[in-house]
Image (tube, rainbow, N blue to C red):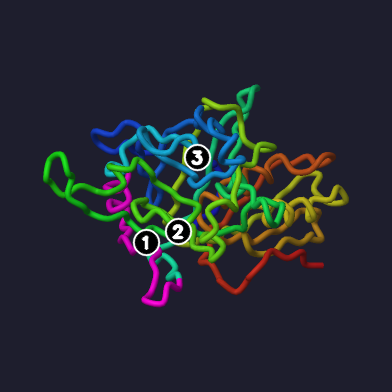
Amino acid sequence: MVRGWLTILAFALLVPLSGFPALKISGGRVIVEGEISTELGRYDNVLKGAIEYLACAEGGKSYESILLLKCKPSQLYKALLKIGLKPGSPASFDESGKPIPPKGPGVVLMVEWKDEKGRPIRVRAEDLIYNSKAKRPMKRIEWTFTGSRLLEDPETGEKTLQADMTGNIISTHWADPSVLFQNPLPEATDESLYKANMKLLPKPGTRVRLIIDAGPPIGYHLFIKGKVQGVGFRAFTKEQADRLGVTGYVKNLPDGRVEALIEGRESLLEEMIRRLKTGPPGAEVKGIEIERVKPTGKYEKFKILY
């Protein structure tokens, strides 16, 4: 068990993957450099704003993709294998034409960029995608690592990852079996369902980092001191936990501190604590003491305890 004052893991700690400067590995995470696609919306007169991909590489459908990643799909594939992921299989159809969902390990995807003042912004990837029928951002999910497929390159005759041929990496729908990741939701059969969330999306060309977190859930027991009671700190904590998909609880302590247990993937907890260091308007956080604990797994949601 480790106690101490929290230092948020910075990207300076990430280890570059040899030969691929746009890819870095940190434990169970792969971080990929990219940008907001400058081609997004190019054919909106036909597509009506619909997108089919969260991310693609050069040569992919960048006009229907939010992110353009600075790597080949096969390079990313190798990095994912390096952190222990095993590819599954893309969505398909049975003999009666009924769709079969994609299979494979799930990962949390987060996207980070800096605003005009240089402040970091990190959100769940689903927040960048808008469900046009539900009229809200996409539901929180773990994206399925399907792993693409090996096919014969018609030009060279060699076995090649299909994603390298199409240039597509993460799809919001089930129609493209070439990608590395697919959206597991049944609604993914509708290719026109999703649009880019323009209210949140930074301007085209903005540099971003895609964080692919395949690590196991972890837990942190937090003790927050300062002016943190009577300022809506518990409600703020729950709001941030719900936005990030973090589970656990928060409560006030008799000595004026706030106690919280947060559980989830490491990337989510890092961002959660970063937000808690600021707190709501009126709060003055003077420090966060952290104890890493084994996750209980018993909390389906985040609760305020009284």
Label 1 sits on a secondary structure element that is loop
Please, what is the three-letter code of the amino acid marked with disc 3?
Answer: Glu
Q: Residue 55: percent from the left, percent from the top?
A: 45, 42
Front one among 111 and 289:
111
Please, what is the three-letter code of the amino acid marked with disc 2?
Answer: Trp
Crowd rating for badge 1 (residues with CA inside 10 Å; few <14, some 14–19, many 20+) = many
User: Which residue is denoted by mark 3 in the rendering?
Assistant: 64
Query: Which label's residue is closer to the chain start, 2 or 3?
Result: 3
- Measure the alpha-carbon separation of dots 3 and 1: 20 Å
Crowd rating for badge 3 (residues with CA inside 10 Å; few <14, some 14–19, many 20+) = many
Q: Is residue 36 above or below residue 302?
A: above
- Measure the alpha-carbon separation of dots 2 and 1: 8 Å
Viewer-nearest of labels 3 and 1?
A: 3
Determine contact: label 2, label 1, CB under 8 Å: yes
Q: Is residue 53 magenta?
A: no
What mark, if any, has residue 174 been given in the picture?
Answer: 2
Q: Residue at x 73, y 65 (%)?
A: 303
What residue occupies the far bottom of the structure in this picture? 96
Q: Residue at x 60, y 27 (%)?
A: 203
Determine contact: label 2, label 3, CB under 8 Å: no
Front one among 4 and 300:
300
Give the magenta range: 76-98
Front one among 117 and 206:
206
User: Which residue is denoted by mark 1 in the rendering?
Assistant: 90
